[in-house]
Image: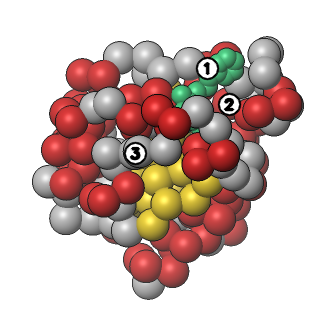
Amino acid sequence: MVKNKNKTVFVLNGPNLNLLGARQPEIYGADTLKDIEKALKAQAKSLGLALEFRQSNHEGELVDWCQEAAREAAGVIINAGGYSHTSVAIRDALEALEIPVVEVHLSNIYAREDFRHTSLISAVAAATICGFGAQGYHFALEGLAGKLT
Ligand code: CA2
């Protein structure tokens, strides 16, 4: 149970993002997900916000967390990983939210394989940030904070 809904941002990370830093740094950067969490929590603190930072390899768990965000968060940042391109269920869960959603991708999905060019999430997000690596999470949090004030 998260304490202050108005000051809490859920940061949801999808499949394989737990592998960050270990492989393919030329695409995803050298930071681990733990590094990203630590830096983002410091930024959140300076903005007066609290983060729930989570990662799952399971579509249903990500759907559950979107539903939990509706009850407990003021906004959501999501990198749904490969599910961004396939998951109607995650898209539907995000569309049902009445709080702002910002989509993040580390890589520039439009400069990669064709199957990555479509994100089902983009149409239900307030904004999408891609191609800035881990910095994209910081831009997302800054932008989201602006929408919460
Ligand atoms: O660029 C992104 O952030 C992605 O959401 C990352 C996903 C990919 O499927 C999306 O198309 C774009 C992949 C998650 C990370 O996968 C890794 C696999 C091996 C080693 C490190 C990361």
Q: CA gap, disc 2 to disc 1?
A: 6 Å
User: Which residue is label 1 attached to?
Assistant: 18
The answer to whether residue 142 is visible is: yes
Q: Counting residues from the N terminus, which is met first, the one under dot 2 or under dot 1?
A: 1
Q: Which residue is mark 3?
A: 119
- In the figure, 36 relative to 138: above or below? above
Residue 56 on image: x %, y %: 44, 22
Residue placed at 69% from the left, 51% from the top? 131
Q: Is residue 71 above or below residue 75?
A: above
**In this figure, which residue is indicated by the disc labeled 2?**
33
Disc 3 or 1, which lies upstream in sequence?
A: 1
State the CA–CA distance, disc 3 to disc 1. 20 Å
Pointer 3 with pointer 1, Cβ within 8 A: no
Tell me whether the residue at label 2 lies in contact with that at label 1, contact meaning CB atoms closer than 8 angstroms: yes
Residue ID at (43%, 17%):
57
Q: Amino acid at mark 1?
A: Asn
Q: Nearer the viewer, mark 3 or mark 2?
A: 3
Residue 10 at x, y percent in the picture: 42, 48
Q: Give the amino acid at mark 2.
A: Leu
| 33 horizontally vs 104: left or right | right
Determine whether the residue tagged by mark 3 lies in a helix, strand or loop. Answer: loop
Q: Quarter holding the C terminus? A: bottom left
Q: Which coloring applies here?
A: secondary structure
- Per the model, the C-alpha gap separating discs 3 and 2 is 21 Å
Please tell me whether mark 2 sits on a helix, a strand or a loop.
helix
Mark 3 or mark 2: whose residue is earlier in sequence: 2
- Secondary structure category for the residue under label 1: helix
- The amino acid at mark 3 is Ser
Q: Position of residue 34 (x, y in %)?
A: 70, 30
